[in-house]
Amino acid sequence: MAEINNKLMESLIRRLDELGEAMERASIAEYIELFRRPRRLLYLNFLAGVFRGFGIAVGFTAVGAIFLYLLGKIASLNLPLIGRFLAEIARIVEVEFHRLP
């Protein structure tokens, strides 16, 4: 019976050590410290939001520029189907523009 208890205790101690190491690797202490200082958490989240928004703006601009460049190249090929499509878009934009007060 004592041998079973010793094995159980060794197993529990080993598991606790593994759990402690996993918590250290996950930086749980730093994460908890953020919740103890809410102003720092708000500041970091604000900065993350600003940089995320900036990244989205730059990315959208780059993708939009590439799309417009490719659309211009396709339009310069003078393909009938695409030409009609672009003419229809231009017509719709012009009609909507003249409808504005």
Image (tube, rainbow, N blue to C red):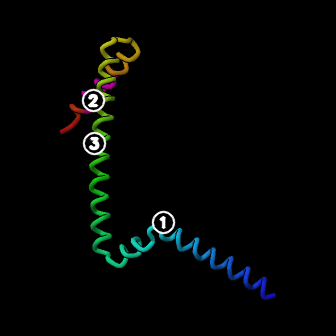
The image shows residue 30 at horizontal and vertical percentages of: 39, 71
Q: Residues within 10 Å of mark 3 (few under 14, many from 20)?
A: few
Check residue 91 for magenta coloring: yes
Q: Are the residues at dot 2 and dot 3 in contact (C-beta closer than 8 Å)? A: no
Q: Depth-wise, is mark 2 or mark 1 nearer the camera?
A: 1
Look at the picture and state if 57 lies above or below 74: below
> Nearest the camera: 63 or 74?
63
> Nearest the camera: 4 or 67?
4
Indicate the amino acid at tag 1.
Arg
Question: In the rendered image, which quarter is residue 101 located in?
Answer: top left
The image shows residue 38 at horizontal and vertical percentages of: 32, 75
Upstream in sequence: badge 2 or badge 1: 1
Q: Depth-wise, is mark 2 or mark 3 nearer the camera?
A: 3
* Disc 2 from disc 3: Cα separation: 26 Å
Question: In the rendered image, which quarter is residue 62 located in?
Answer: top left
Which residue carries the number 3 mark? 58
Indicate the amino acid at tag 3.
Val
Q: Secondary structure at mark 1?
A: helix
Indicate the amino acid at tag 2.
Val
Upstream in sequence: badge 1 or badge 3: 1
Q: Secondary structure at mark 2?
A: helix
Which residue carries the number 2 mark? 93
Question: In the rendered image, which quarter is residue 68 located in?
Answer: top left
Upstream in sequence: badge 2 or badge 3: 3
Report the magenta residues as a range.
88-96
Q: Which residue is found at the position 23% from the left and 34% from the top?
A: 99
Which residue carries the number 1 mark? 25
Q: Which residue is found at the position 68% from the left and 76% from the top?
A: 11
* Disc 2 from disc 1: Cα separation: 57 Å
Q: Depth-wise, is mark 1 or mark 3 nearer the camera?
A: 1
Q: Which residue is found at the position 31% from the left and 29% from the top?
A: 66
